[in-house]
Amino acid sequence: MEEAFPASVVFGFFCFMMILQLTWVKLFVAETKGDSLEEMESRFVS
């Protein structure tokens, strides 16, 4: 990668992908803090 692109482009691409991943997690991954296993199972199985 370093031979094909300057280091700043590689780093910028990495930052962009991390921002996309963080956005996806915040939007689509459910918060389970404080829930019992039974509550999580009923929420995700049904």
Image (cartoon, helix red, strand yellow):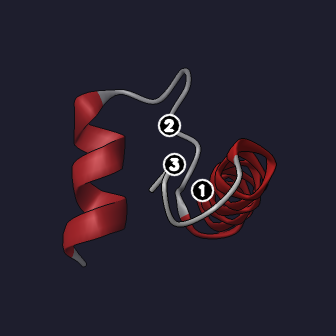
Q: Can you say which quadrant of the picture contains the C terminus? A: bottom left
Q: Compared to 39, does 12 lie above or below? A: below
Give how far apart the Cα atoms at labels 3 and 2 are.
Answer: 40 Å
Q: Which element type, helix, strand or loop, lies under badge 3?
A: loop
The amino acid pointed to by label 1 is Val
The residue under label 1 is: 25
Q: Secondary structure at mark 2?
A: loop
Q: Name the quarter where the N terminus is drawn.
A: bottom left
In the rendered view, would you say 45 is above or below 21?
below
Q: Nearer the viewer, mark 3 or mark 1?
A: 3
Q: CA distance from mark 3 to mark 1?
A: 29 Å
* Mark 2: amino acid: Thr
* Secondary structure state at the residue bearing disc 1: helix
- The residue under label 3 is 2
Disc 2: which residue: 32
Compare residues 24 and 15 and report the one nearer the observer: 15
Q: Is residue 1 left or right of residue 26?
A: left
Residue at position x 54%, y 21% from top? Answer: 34
